[in-house]
């Protein structure tokens, strides 16, 4: 896709920004769904991430067939958005339907891995919301069954797969725009909204802890951008520093880690203030030998309420890239992998290593 490059000198006095060059990335804005190539269903919908997951597969050539959830209100909401989804009477109805190739789920986190194991044993591939696994014991069983069945167990790391600026950053890093990556810094703040949260949200045994849950995104991006195929936790800590009324909850965590391709720092929290016009000012900084990239995923604070902002400085220039029109390839690539038994969307080793590192950082974290 050709790029239209324009250089704009501008002083943004209100926000205190320095003069910089701007590149507008032109890509397909339509992203029309491909013709159906696979059939998929949904089991359990306890987090709204399921809507983005289903849309990604539909755009990539998936036909949504049916859905099951224990909660009637969640089922009603889902089928209102996706009226083509038939109501299944039980999970087994979907698992035993041999025409279904893939199952999606955003169930309660500690129930996701057991379901995925059943899905693989029934000869189907599995795409699950993060955290896709909540304990190291679950991880060991997932690895065992995945190896035996050769099915796909994929976790939807949406902060990479569903963020256009992060996709663009991957293209730039792979092209050598900032040299060899040395370190990533991933920040994942979230808004609490306690009155809207279900009971399991506050129970660490159900959601796995803050690093296992939110931090899974940042471990995925660390491995991807550093090219690491192995890693270890240098230090980690977690705490509940503000919400004492929820004793089994964690509101802050951070991690230092290293891999065979670089180092990383991760911070996650539940402290997005109500005055910010998004659920979280998620950021990613990628430091290279010849420059750096900063991604402002959801907002460019005090400048723009929209997301998908990318800033880059290297040996040649300092640029801003509006990534609003960058295409999201995950859905198509995942469907391709289901059909061709390939690993173009994400390798199985990468998927489970990102989770393993998050689980170890969580388990061995010092308490604040």
Image: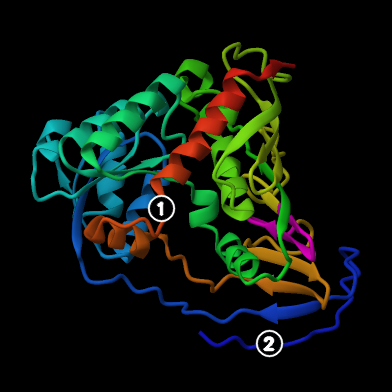
Q: Most prominent secondary structure in the magenta stretch?
A: strand
Classify 332 as above or below 30: above
Going from N to C along the chain, the mark reached first, 2 or 1, is: 2
Protein image colouring? rainbow
Q: Is residue 288 part of the magenta span, yes or no? A: yes
Asked if one can make out residue 214 in the rendered structure from this viewpoint, the answer is yes
Q: Position of residue 173 (x, y in %)?
A: 64, 65
Residue at the disc numbered 1: 52
- The residue at 62%/54% (across/down) is 225
For residue 17, side relative to residue 193 (left or right): right
Helix, strand or loop for disc 2: loop
Q: Position of residue 13 (x, y in %)?
A: 91, 70
Whether residues under marks 2 and 1 lie with C-beta atoms below 8 angstroms apart, the answer is no
- The residue at 53%/20% (across/down) is 202
Viewport quadrant of the C terminus: top right
Q: Is residue 62 part of the magenta span, yes or no? A: no
Asked if one can make out residue 90 in the rendered structure from this viewpoint, the answer is no
25, 170: nearer the viewer:
170
351, 75: nearer the viewer:
351
Around disc 2, counting alpha carbons within 10 Å, would you say few (fewer than 14), some (14 to 19), or many (20 or more)? few
147, 279: nearer the viewer:
147
Question: Which portion, as a residue range, is magenta?
Answer: 285-300
- The residue at 72%/88% (across/down) is 6
Around disc 1, counting alpha carbons within 10 Å, would you say few (fewer than 14), some (14 to 19), or many (20 or more)? some
Rendered image: mark on residue 5: 2
Helix, strand or loop for disc 1: helix
């Amino acid at each position: 896709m050709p790029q239209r490059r324009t250089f704009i000198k501008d002083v943004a006095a209100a926000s205190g920004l320095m003069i910089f060059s701007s590149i507008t990335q032109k890509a397909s804005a339509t992203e029309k769904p491909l013709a159906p190539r696979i059939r998929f269903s949904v089991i359990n919908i306890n987090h709204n991430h399921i809507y983005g997951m289903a849309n990604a597969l539909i755009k990539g050539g998936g036909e949504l067939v049916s859905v099951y959830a224990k909660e009637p209100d969640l089922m009603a909401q889902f089928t209102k958005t996706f009226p083509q989804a038939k109501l299944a009477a039980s999970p087994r109805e979907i698992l035993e339907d041999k025409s279904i190739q893939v199952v999606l789920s955003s169930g309660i986190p500690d129930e996701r891995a057991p379901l995925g194991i059943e899905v693989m044993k029934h000869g189907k591939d599995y795409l699950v919301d993060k955290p896709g696994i909540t304990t190291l014991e679950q991880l060991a069983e997932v690895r065992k069954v995945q190896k035996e069945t050769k099915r796909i167990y994929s976790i939807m790391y949406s902060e990479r797969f569903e963020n256009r600026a992060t996709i663009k950053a991957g293209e730039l890093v792979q092209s050598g725009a900032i040299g060899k990556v040395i370190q990533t810094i991933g920040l994942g703040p979230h808004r609490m909204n306690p009155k809207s949260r279900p009971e399991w949200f506050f129970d660490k045994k159900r959601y796995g802890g803050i690093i296992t849950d939110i931090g899974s995104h940042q471990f995925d991006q660390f491995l991807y951008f550093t090219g690491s195929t192995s890693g270890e936790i240098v230090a980690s800590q977690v705490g509940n520093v503000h919400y004492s009324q929820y004793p089994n909850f964690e509101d802050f965590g951070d991690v230092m880690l290293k891999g065979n391709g670089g180092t990383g720092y991760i911070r996650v929290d539940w402290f997005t203030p109500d005055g910010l016009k998004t659920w979280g000012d998620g950021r990613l900084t990628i430091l290279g030998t010849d420059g750096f990239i900063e991604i402002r995923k959801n907002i460019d604070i005090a400048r723009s309420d929209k997301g998908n902002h990318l800033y880059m400085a290297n040996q040649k220039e300092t640029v801003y890239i509006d990534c609003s029109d960058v295409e999201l390839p995950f859905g198509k690539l995942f469907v391709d992998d289901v059909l061709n038994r390939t690993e173009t969307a994400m390798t199985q080793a990468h998927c489970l290593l990102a989770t393993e590192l998050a689980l170890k950082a969580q388990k061995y974290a010092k308490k604040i």
